[in-house]
Every structure is written in structure tokens, then in C-alpha cells.
Amino acid sequence: MFPKREPKESCEVVVIGGGPSGLFATHLLEGRDVVLLEKESRLGGNCSSDAWQGIPFSTGAAFFTSGDTELVELMQKVGVTSLPVAGGDALIVRGEPFFEFFGDGARRLPFTHDVRADFERSAEHAAKLLRTRGSAALDDESFFEHIRPFAPEIHQFWDRFGASNWGAAAKSTSARLGLQAYGWLTGEEKRLTFAGGLGVGAEALGRYVSGRGQVRTSAFVHHVERAADGGSVLVHLLKDGEPHALRAKAAILALPKFFAARIVDGLGEPQRAAMREFRYTPYPVFNVCLRRSGPQPAYDNWFLDTPFADFVVADWVVHAGKRPDADPSVLTVYHPLAEANRHELLDDARLVQMAEEVVEHLERHFSGVKAAVEEVHVFRRGHALAIPSPGQLSRAEAASRPEGRVIFAHSDSRGDVSSFAGALRAARQAVDALATLD
């Protein structure tokens, strides 16, 4: 139970949540009377950045694509220019990188003939299903059922790729999404990012909106209700620990549905139930700081035999694999956990142990890494993902429906991958819905 006060101030729109979606929504509402409320002392949510020895690194989504034209233009407007990601992903086997492993490169994989053939055959199977089946039908099916006939190495890869990109192993993944992901590895869509990852973009966006509107950090919203007159929304919060309230014509909740379901008054039970069915992956990220250049076989590097899923070279867009040997470097290691292990995020000793395990497994594949480690920076809340399990499209549609003057945004709103570009799409959808109220 939190104390409430009568509102002593008002605004046109209140945006709740200062992660990427809330920042995008605030930006899209530029010129209007908007107040952004963020419970943390900083903006960016789970998409944040840091630096070591002048090398920026981050958590959260690693890249977007050149096809996300609105995002590309918006980032330029807020003062950061994206750079192209050169090359494709690598599958690391016994320290050696293998490329185009679901295409022509499958024939060079150090596996048996049957396993190599299954890498190619599974990709062909995915392409055929996407051509002949509808998205809605595939969304209700499990991805695992479509890759079950293929070699265990295929399952191992997709369990790791899925956990890293959308938070789930193949059995908990919608077939629509898993089958589409084969296409992500072809390199047809050109990837873009910043030196240090997308946390750099989120920080730039935060600075931009802070300079052009009312942004309040350390503002924890605990209750949202529609006013008795039906023409406004009351938002109750603690600002620096003190009770406060705002009246607004409308509210955009740019926060996970897990929280939205618990703070919005008057939701219909079907919508609240759909929100409560959302599942989220516990996801620490380890930035391994090396006093000399570390392994740089590819931008994104995948493993079948490590406790983590993959690592990206934090400043790949600067060096593209040609960093001088004497230069320091940072590897951003993505380490999603099973949902049952969420409690490990609060266990300092366990996180230190995980960091040591990360280094040991990197050393096993790339001799000399361990001796070069200077620091490991651990983010307990890394690439936070809403799990797109079978049926998530319909759940997301039910959960994200506007409720009067309360509108929902967040990268979990679309039933797809939680991403930087997805956060912008959700914000645009929310702002469009707001326009229907004016």
C-alpha cells in the first residue's frame, strides 16, 4: 500500500517509463505538454552504457537494421550516427570461427556429414514453411516441433540463439519467430549499431528529450486511475520517496506488461490476465575488459558448449576485426538464464562465480584471454526480453489494447522480439492511438 495525494499539477500527457519506448514516445510528442516519469535515477531502462579505457560498451539489444529507416533518421536527429556492422555472425567450435553455417558454409563445419547436411536442410525447411504457412498459424505452434527431426546440434544452436535474442529455448518459442530467425543469419539485412552498442543511442535520446521537456527521474509510479469525470487520468507516484500526484489528459505506460497489470486501475479481467501471462527472461550481461586486443573473429560470436550464448566485440564498428594487438578491448558477453534461476541475479557471490566461468570458457576457446583480463563489469539487468512463446501475438494484442485514456507502449507490446526498433514501433503505435483521443 502506497500513500496517495490529491494532484497539485497537471499536464497534457504523462509518459511512464524512461526506457527506450518511453524515450521514443516522449520524442514523438515533442512540442506538447509532456512529463516523463522514470523510477530509476537515470534514463535508458535496461538499455544502458558504460565505458572502460575509453571503450564504450552496453547492455540490451546490440543492433538494428538499415530497413528501420525511421529509427536511423531519429538517431541522427538526436546526435548519434549509426555505423554498419561488417561481416556475418560466426559459430565458434573449438576456438575456430565458421561463417554462413546455415548456407554454403555448413559444408565446412567440423561435424559429421549428416550434421552438416542438417544445417542446410533445416534452413531450407524454414524457408519453405514461411512461404506456405500464415504467420497467425505458425505463431500458435512451437518452433521446436519444426526442428525436432534435425540433429541435436541444431537444437543446441537455436536454444542459445533464441535465449540471447528473444529469451527462450526452442520449446518456448513461437514457430513464426524461430523460422523467421533463419533469415536473420543470411546477412541480407544490413545491420547498424554504435561503437559500444545501443545503450549509446538510448543515452543520446535521453539527453535530447531531457533538454526539451519535463523529465523526472527517481519517480516511482505505483497507481494509475481514470478520474471520475472520465476526461483525465490520475497518476500517483513517489518522487524521491515523497507521495505526489499528477493529472493528465492521457497516460502512456511504456513499461513491461508485468508492471502495467499491477498499477492500472479498472482494467478488464481478460486484458489483465493477458498481461499477467507475459514471461520475462532473467538476463545478466558480462563486459569482459582486456588490457590487450581480445578475440575478434566476428561481430557476433555463437557457441554450443558454453554457459553463455554469445559475445559481441564492443567496438567492432570501429575496427571490424583489425584492432591492433596492443590495444585494450571489451567483449560484451550475453548470458541469459533459465527462468527458474532468476534468483541468481540477486546473489553477488553467484554473479562473481558466473563472471569467472565466462572467463574460463573464453580461455578454453581463445588461449591467452584469461591472462589479459583487467575487469569484468556485470549488469544484472541486461537485455530484458519478453518471451514470445506460442500464441504471443494474440496475447500481446489483448494486453496492449488502449483502455480509455490509458495507452500501452513498450517493446513487449507487439508480441515480437524485444528490440530497440521494436520500442520505437510500440511508441509510434501509442502516439497514433493518442491522436484518436484529441
Image (cartoon, rainbow, N blue to C red):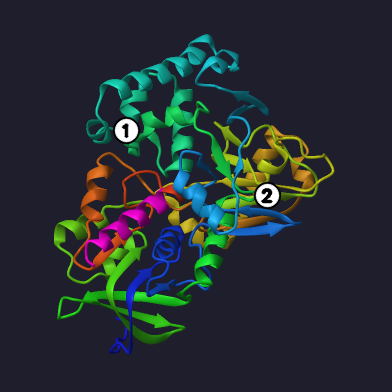
Q: Residue at x 49, y 47 (%)?
A: 336
User: Of the residues shown, which amino acid type is indicated by label 2?
Assistant: Val
Q: Is residue 237 above or below residue 400?
A: below
Q: How many marks?
A: 2
User: Of the residues shown, which amino acid type is indicated by label 1?
Assistant: Arg
Q: Secondary structure at mark 2?
A: strand
Q: Is residue 43 above or below residue 398?
A: below
Q: Is residue 338 above or below residue 111?
A: below
User: Quadrant location of residue 249?
Assistant: bottom left
Q: Is residue 190 left or right of residue 174?
A: right
Question: Residue lying farthest right?
Answer: 326
Q: Which residue is mark 1?
A: 176
In the image, the segment drawn in magenta is: 422-438
Q: Position of residue 193 (x, y in %)?
A: 58, 45
Check if residue 348 falls in the magenta segment.
no
Q: Residue at x 39, y 44 (%)?
A: 417
Q: Which residue is mark 2?
A: 288
Q: Position of residue 320 (x, y in %)?
A: 69, 36
